[in-house]
Image: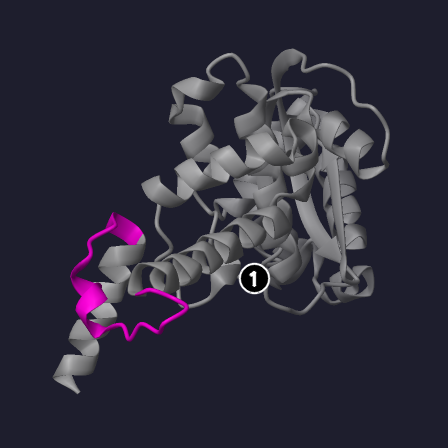
Amino acid sequence: MHELRYIQEQLQKYLLHAENDIEQYIVETKKVSTQARLAIYANAYFSRLLDALADNYPVLQKHIGEEEFAKLGHDYINRYPSTYRSIRWFGDYLSYFIQENSRYVDFPHLAELAQFEWTMTLVFDAAEDAILQLTDMQNISPQQWPNMKFRIHPSVHILTLSWNVVAIWQAILDDQIPGGPLQTMPVSWVLWRKELVNQFYSLSEDEAWAMDAMLKGLTFAEICEGLSQWTNVEATPLRAASLLKSWISAGMIADVVLK
């Protein structure tokens, strides 16, 4: 058993670091040498990882082209070898890798495009949970509203993007030619899943603040108080209630938590 583990470790070292100690354990044939058999396995291993990256980042692959994506993938595999039992999670650092890679210093929007695509996979794969209904709010008395907190559906994610990557992503997904990358003021986006379909939209400044406050566990009263930065005090409860209604209708909230 210990020898098997040792052999497995040597094979891993060959794949990740090109160390050749594994060769003594590989049986060659008249037609295929030890080195050729190992190379076949290594090529299959790296090809499968590249396929996994392409599955998670199909729009990025189309945007930069298969050849450039293969170069990106090869460099990424060397920098961040797979450490997960499930290949599904391979590629989770691609956005950071692009950001730190001098090869893409003139294309900063690519990191955000990768970040958006990866987040979309997280949204789709998020756990199932209850969905709060508007009718459920009828069971909460007016006296309880100020102390309400909210449990967000697991699929909800918020991103802040400074490039028009959502427009680029949508155009490529629709087989259209995307416009060039444009840097904008930072814009917050909410992404979530409703009835097995990913949804997303950009947030106004006050809604972005309110949603972040909700995620941090602030009460409804505290959210109302914070929204007074954008509207007068008398109008903030109505604005907060309007936002809450839209979030519930969209299926973003799992439950109300009362103190």
Height in image: 214 above or below 193? above
Residue 42, image x, y percentages? 39, 57
Q: Quadrant of the N terminus?
A: bottom left
In magenta, the rendered stretch is 16-33
- Residue at 72% x, 14% y: name it: 180
> Which structural element holds mark 1?
strand
The extreme front residue here reads 30
Taking the image as drawn, is residue 249 in sight? yes
177 part of magenta stretch: no
In the drawing, does residue 225 fall left or right of residue 200?
left
Between 64 and 123, the one nearer to me in the picture: 64
Taking the image as drawn, is residue 226 in sight? no
Label 1 Cα neighbours within 10 Å, binned few <14 / some 14-19 / many ≥20: few
The extreme bottom residue here reads 1
Identity, as a three-letter code, of the amino acid under mark 1:
Val
Between 105 and 221, the one nearer to me in the picture: 105
Give the main secondary structure, helix, strand or loop, of the magenta stretch.
Answer: loop
Q: Quadrant of residue 136?
A: bottom right
